[in-house]
């Protein structure tokens, strides 16, 4: 309707953490931070529902809230009475308004704006985890901060991001892998796998000012950690890499090394190496 008030109905990104609202294409790293951002979704971070959102104070204050089909719908699952997932986010930009559409986010702007942003999100769903005979309520909240000054002549662009998550489950979710977790029966999508715990992520990048051929180099590092409550185990990921930024998010080449460690698994360590090209048009 206007910048201040809009209503969306359909399949969309539920209001939540910055990571899910930025997705995998508007971040410095090549891979989505799936160690820490683990909310219930159908596909690609999305769910079916309704969102009311707006941008006020010159776009600096962004709000979004809505109701969605949610998690564990099914006759043998916890949400057999079809209760909604409710989700909300509030974000304020202390410097420039982040140049994003709607209530979506990015985690780097490659020095095109002065960014200092703080955001909070909350999601809740009654009977959102477990099975029909052992139900629990799902609650999750997160905080995030982003710092990136505008590029000036002869200077590079540092990018710093920090996120904290807390996931509370009133019961063991099916197919979660935690000790004593039941097996999911009868689900078709968006069911099982949620885990109680707390998580954190910090990342940093630096865009060098010198033009080298078509673009500029942007090395990055990201640390993720999820501490599980029930099994008292942790999952960690360390990402190191370099972007060759040709045209912002629209054209870049990335190399990335990732080291994963999960103390709940028999084989705890895994290493990955990526080379990727991103073109958006």
Image (spheres, rainbow, N blue to C red):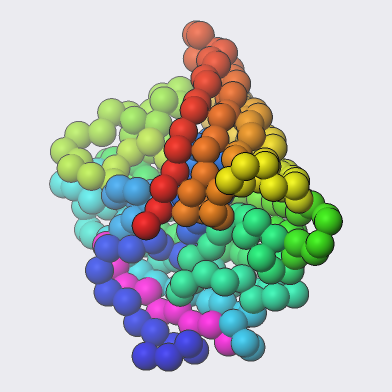
Q: Quadrant of the N terminus?
A: bottom left
Q: Judge whether residue 203 can be spotted in this image.
A: no
Residue 168's place in the image compared with 61, above or below, is above
Image coordinates for residue 139, horizontal then vertical, percent: 49, 55
- At horizontal 41% and vertical 48% (from top left) the residue drawn is 279
Residue 53 part of the magenta-drawn span = yes
Which residue: 83% across, 56% down? 154
Left-right relation of 258 to 221: left
For the point 29% across and 49% down, which residue is it?
42
Would you say 6 lies left or right of 80 here? right
Image coordinates of residue 184 in percent, x first then y, are 26, 33
Instruction: Find residue 96 and report its horizontal and vertical position in percent.
Output: 70, 75
Q: Give the residue furthest to the right.
A: 154
Q: On the rendered image, what quadrant is the C terminus found in? A: bottom left
Q: What stretch is highlighted in magenta?
A: 48-56
In the image, 44 versus 75, the foreground residue is 44
Most common SS among magenta residues: strand
Looking at the image, residue 158 lies above or below residue 113 = above
């Amino acid at each position: 309707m206007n910048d201040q008030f809009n209503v969306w109905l359909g399949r969309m990104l539920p209001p939540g953490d910055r990571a899910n609202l930025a997705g995998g294409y508007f971040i410095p790293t090549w891979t989505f931070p799936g160690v820490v951002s683990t909310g219930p979704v159908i596909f690609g971070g999305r769910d079916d529902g309704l969102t009311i959102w707006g941008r006020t104070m010159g776009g600096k204050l962004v709000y979004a809230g809505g109701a969605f089909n949610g998690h564990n719908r099914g006759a043998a699952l916890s949400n057999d009475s079809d209760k909604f997932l409710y989700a909300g986010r509030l974000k304020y930009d202390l410097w420039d308004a982040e140049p994003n559409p709607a209530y979506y986010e990015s985690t780097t702007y490659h020095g095109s704006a002065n960014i200092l942003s703080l955001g909070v999100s909350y999601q809740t769903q009654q009977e959102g985890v477990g099975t029909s005979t052992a139900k629990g309520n799902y609650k999750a909240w997160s905080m995030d901060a982003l710092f990136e000054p505008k590029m000036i002549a002869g200077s590079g662009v540092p990018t710093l991001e920090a996120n904290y998550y807390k996931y509370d489950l009133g019961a063991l979710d099916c197919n979660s892998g935690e000790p004593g977790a039941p097996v999911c029966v009868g689900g078709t999508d968006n069911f099982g796998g949620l885990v109680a715990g707390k998580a954190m992520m910090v990342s940093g990048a630096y865009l060098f000012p010198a033009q080298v051929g078509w673009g500029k180099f942007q090395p990055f590092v990201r640390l993720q950690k999820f501490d599980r409550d029930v099994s008292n185990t942790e999952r960690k990921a360390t990402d190191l890499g370099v972007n060759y930024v040709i045209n912002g998010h629209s054209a870049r080449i990335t190399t990335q090394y990732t080291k994963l460690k999960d103390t709940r698994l028999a084989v705890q360590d895994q290493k990955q190496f990526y080379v990727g090209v991103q073109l958006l048009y």
